[in-house]
Amino acid sequence: MIANAARPTARPELLALLGRTPLVRITADLPGPHPGFWAKLEGLAAGGMKARAAESMLRGARARGELRPGAPVVESTSGTLGIGLAFAGQALGHPVVLVGDRELEPSMRQLLCAHGVRLELVDRPAPEGGWQAARLARLRELLAVLPDAYWPDQYNNPDNTAGYASLAAELTAQLDRLDVLVCSVGTGGHSAGVIAPLRRHWPALRLIGVDATGSTIFGQPARPRLMRGLGSSIHPRNVAYDAFDEVHWVGPAEAVDSCRRLARGSFVSGGWSTGAVARVAAWAARVHSGAEVATVFPDGPHRYLGTVYDDDFIAAHGLAPSAAAIRPIEIPHPRAAEAAGWVRCTRVTDPLRASVSPYPPEETL
Ligand SMILES: Cc1ncc(COP(=O)(O)O)c(C=O)c1O
């Protein structure tokens, strides 16, 4: 059992390090020529992209009196929000207890612990809902023994989304024009948070969501997934379904190939979500002739040295470049067929609201 952690000193001066990330033009071969797109390098800010969401959720809870000064914060994470919470916890003076799982990379475990986080790991996925459901079950046990603790619930907390107003403001200051925005979707936070303010600025802006194969967010069946960060085995309520013009499901082979091409050709790179959005952004820049395309690279490459950038891992999982699709297959409806690689659909619906016939499991693309 976990005892209540000591009350840390708040270090509000750290908040000066939040956001304000650079935007860079990407022209690397991804694969094949494209006119280039803009990438917001969120991995270059202290605490990464999710520090924006973490700070917003803790501040919101403090303002409503749901989080008392010095009280612990407990959350389930596959890593990125954990680092963001470690940052916001130090800045605002809260101990942080995180529930991760066995799949959390050893380097991320070390990083979290080095930053003062108390880390709990679950060792098997739940029969329904996978790792996410298993982490949430453990989280509820922790909340029961830490009566003062606050659970931000990043999947459903509107303050997660609200935290990305700063990201939208930075984009409007950094770009003269924007026609297409490509966002990875995990909790749905950053895509939902940026699209409303950006459309006030550029009303015709198209939003492309990028999900992982095997993720159920946009109505595909949930399967075990290799990729972390984007995708989900639950239906987060923060996903702004109505805001998306189209969705792409990208597989691990495409993400790996893109990450490696980015690192070789444009120096900046990242992990699964970065590789996936880069491939879709390059495709969008190619097919929408003359359009300005931008995307968000949520983190950098370091966390993925043992996966995306490891030749043995790639060989063991059959992720050679030859397995990576160079263009998406089109489907008319998210349930028309199961995506095994890169698939595109221009019909976006909330699976919890949609009444569609069950998809035929024998059809896999
Ligand atoms: C590395 C990484 N990329 C992308 C995402 C998706 O972002 P969002 O949760 O804002 O949809 C996440 C979310 O956990 C992430 O950790």
Image (tube, rainbow, N blue to C red):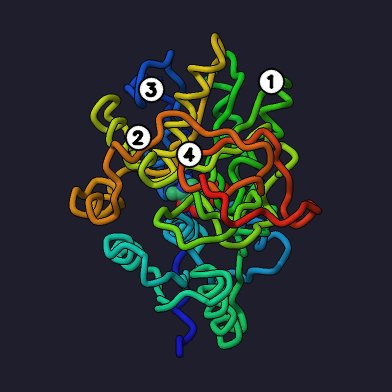
Disc 3 marks which residue?
A: 26
Callout 4: SS: loop
- Say if disc 2 is inside 8 Å of ligand 1: no
Whether residue 51 appears in this view of the structure is no
Q: As shown in the figure, which amino acid type bears the numbered disc 1? A: Trp
To which quarter of the image does residue 179 belong? Answer: top right
Counting residues from the start of the chain, the first of labels 3 and 2 encountered is 3
Compared across the picture, whether 241 is left or right of 265 comes to right
Q: As shown in the figure, which amino acid type bears the numbered disc 3? A: Ile
Measure the alpha-carbon separation of dots 2 and 4: 12 Å
Mark whose residue sits in front, 4 or 1: 4
Q: How many marks?
A: 4
Whether residue 208 appears in this view of the structure is yes
Disc 2 marks which residue?
A: 258
Mark whose residue sits in front, 1 or 3: 3
Q: As shown in the figure, which amino acid type bears the numbered disc 4? A: Trp
Disc 1 marks which residue?
A: 202
Mark whose residue sits in front, 3 or 4: 4
Q: Residues within 10 Å of mark 1 (few under 14, many from 20)?
A: some
Compared across the picture, whether 22 is left or right of 259 comes to right
Counting residues from the start of the chain, the first of labels 4 and 1 encountered is 1
Disc 4 marks which residue?
A: 342
Identify the residue at image location x=66%, y=62%.
Answer: 61
Q: Residue furthest bottom?
A: 1
Counting residues from the start of the chain, the first of labels 3 and 4 encountered is 3
